[in-house]
Image (cartoon, rainbow, N blue to C red):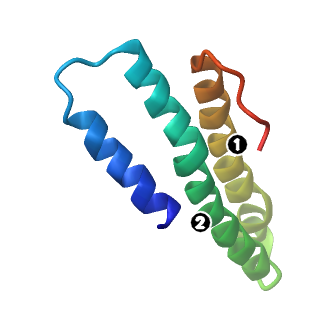
Amino acid sequence: MSNWVSFRDSLLETWEVENVTNQLKEEMTRNILTNGIPAVKAVADKFVGQLQQQAKNETGWNKLRDQMVLPLIISGTIWAVQFALRKCTTTKQDNN
């Protein structure tokens, strides 16, 4: 089963509960960290790779955009979300 299917099923199970507990919130946060973030990272890495390949054929601001600006924004956003989620968990997460 792919990470996305596992992540999706976990989300659906979480939304079907009537009482959201701290344990449930903790599990949801861990699930996003272990399944959601890696899936998003894989897509982002592929996209950034393609951007940087295309930057070789660009000039001026488009080259800067494709080579640095968009990759930094994408990577920075993923890092910030991962950092915030790790801070929200009560147990220490690994540094993947």
Residue 76's disc number: 1
Residue 43's disc number: 2
Which amino acid does the dot numbered 1 rest on?
Gly
Residue under the point 74% across and 50% down = 72
Marks counted in the figure total 2
Q: x%, y% of residue 31?
A: 50, 40
Residue under the point 49% across and 66% down = 2
- In primary-sequence order, the first of circles 2 and 1 is 2
Of helix, strand and loop, which one carries label 2? helix
Which amino acid does the dot numbered 2 rest on?
Val
Residue 23's disc number: none
Vertical relation: 19 (above or below) 59: above
Q: Residue 45 vs residue 89: left or right?
A: right
Residue under the point 47% across and 67% down = 1
What distance separates the C-alpha of mark 2 from that of mark 1? 15 Å
Vertical relation: 86 (above or below) 61: above
Quarter that holds the C terminus: top right
Q: x%, y% of residue 6?
A: 43, 55
Q: x%, y% of residue 22?
A: 41, 14
Vertical relation: 39 (above or below) 56: above
Residue in front for this viewpoint, 43 or 52: 43
Residue in front for this viewpoint, 69 or 83: 83
Label 1 crowd (10 A; few <14 / some 14-19 / many >=20): few
Foreground tag (2 vs 1): 2
Vertical relation: 75 (above or below) 80: below
Q: Residue 33 vs residue 23: left or right?
A: right
Mark 2 touches mark 1? (CB < 8 Å):
no
- Among all residues in the image, which is located at the extreme right? 56
Label 2 crowd (10 A; few <14 / some 14-19 / many >=20): few
